[in-house]
Amino acid sequence: MKTRLNRPHQTPNKSTVPKATPYAAEINQSKSEQQSRMWSTMRWFDGTDKTEEAFHNRFENLPDEDVAFLKSFYNIGDDRELFQMVCKFWNIRVPDLAHIA
């Protein structure tokens, strides 16, 4: 296929740069600002019954931007790992994470 300038039509290259993530703004925050955000996000679970089920229900309602932030902060890849880390933070035993998807 030729273009108006009689040059072959070229398909634009796809960028190899990953898309911006919702937590990208936090990357430029100072460590103390990130730490403060982590503490305020973890307080979401304060007052939750100290059971796996109660924490899982609370975790399911954690806002997406907070989930993304915590994954970035702790360098965690998936929700199961993050849930396990949150439970460990609050001293909640989580014997089996296979039911969390």
Image (tube, helix red, strand yellow):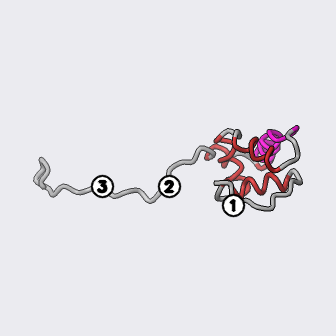
Q: Which residues are magenta?
A: 32-47
**Residue 39's mark?**
none
Q: Residue at x 74, y 42 (%)?
A: 57
**What amino acid is labelled 2 in the image?**
Pro
Residue 82 lies, with reference to residue 61, above or below; the image says: below
- Residue 54 placed where, x, y %? 80, 44
Q: Earlier in the sequence, mark 1 or mark 2?
A: 2
Look at the numbered discs 3 and 2 and tell me whether their residues touch, using CB distance below 8 Å.
no
Q: Which residue is mark 1?
A: 98
Q: Residue at x 79, y 52 (%)?
A: 86
Q: Height in image: 80 above or below 47?
A: below
Q: From this viewpoint, is residue 28 visible?
A: no
- Position of 10 relative to 47 (above/below): below
Instruction: Tell me how far mark 1 sits from mark 2, CA to CA.
Output: 29 Å
Quadrant in which the N terminus is drawn: bottom left
Q: Position of residue 35 (x, y in %)?
A: 80, 47
Disc 3 marks which residue? 12
- Left or right: where does residue 8 sit relative to residue 11? left
For mark 2, what is the residue? 18
